[in-house]
Image (cartoon, grey):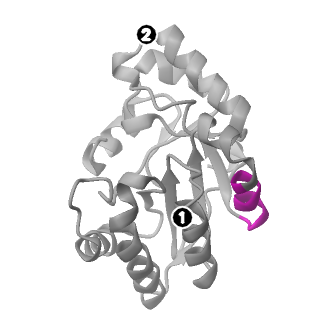
Amino acid sequence: MLHAAAMRLAAAVLPGAIARLPNTGSAVYLTFDDGPDPEITPWVLDQLSAHGAHATFFCLGQQAVRHPELLARIRREGHAVGHHTWDHPNGWRTADRTYLANVMRGHEAVGGHLFRPPYGRICPFQARAVKKHFRTVLWDVLAGDFRPGADGLQVAQHVLLHSLPGSIIVFHDNAQSFTCLRTALPAVLTGFADKNFACRSIPTNVTTL
């Protein structure tokens, strides 16, 4: 997983990629990678609902196939959905043809026009091919909830300190991150409310980005 500074640089050189959204007033954009998960994603959705917040879920194709009812709930509750490949390959370590087939398989399972490469690692050739069909969404604030032993309050403080209007923030609705997320997400949602920041979904129509 690449840090925020690397993502801003990557967005500048990768065809069609963005790391934050301009001209959004007080809006910030929470995103969740790797789900849907039957234990974690419903909890995340409940937290978002309790705070009147919306987000974007970058779903793995294999998880979407296993839990279609969760994918349907995400959409029903007004959140955006993007795809995150079929099973999380690293674009830097995967042959182009194999990687792009994985991307398309993920899209077939999840749908949508938004795509996030696992780890933020995608080669320029892969990015050019993806651009023909999807908009690549990176980030400018990496929560770090996936790190072993990550402290939820410290993660929340990091997110609140570094987020600006238009920021795209990465969390994960996976088992590795859940212990941290239980503390971090409610604190972040409360902190954004105190700052009068609105948590919105990334527009799903590619022409609006």
Report the residue at 60% width, 41% height from top.
Answer: 63
Mark 2 vs 1, N-terminal side: 1
The residue labelled by disc 2 is 95
- Kindly report which numbered mark, 2 or 1, lies closer to the viewer in this rendering: 2
Q: Position of residue 170 (x, y in %)?
A: 42, 56
Q: In the rendered view, would you say 150 is above or below 47?
A: above
Q: In the rendered view, would you say 125 is above or below 155?
A: above
Q: Quadrant of the N terminus?
A: top left
Apparent side of residue 58 relative to residue 88 in the rendered image (left or right): right
Report the residue at 44% width, 26% height from top.
Answer: 89
Report the residue at 71% width, 41% height from top.
Answer: 112
User: Quadrant of the rendered structure where residue 24 is?
Assistant: bottom right
Tag 2 near tag 1, CB within 8 Å: no
Q: Which residues are magenta?
A: 70-78
Report the residue at 61% width, 66% height from top.
Answer: 42
User: Quadrant of the rendered structure where residue 131 is?
Assistant: top right
The residue labelled by disc 1 is 23
User: Badge 1 local density, few (<14 within 10 Å), some, or many (20+)?
Assistant: few
Residue 132 is at least partly visible in this image: no
Which residue is more in the foreground, 157 or 203?
157
Tell me how far mark 2 sits from mark 1, CA to CA.
37 Å
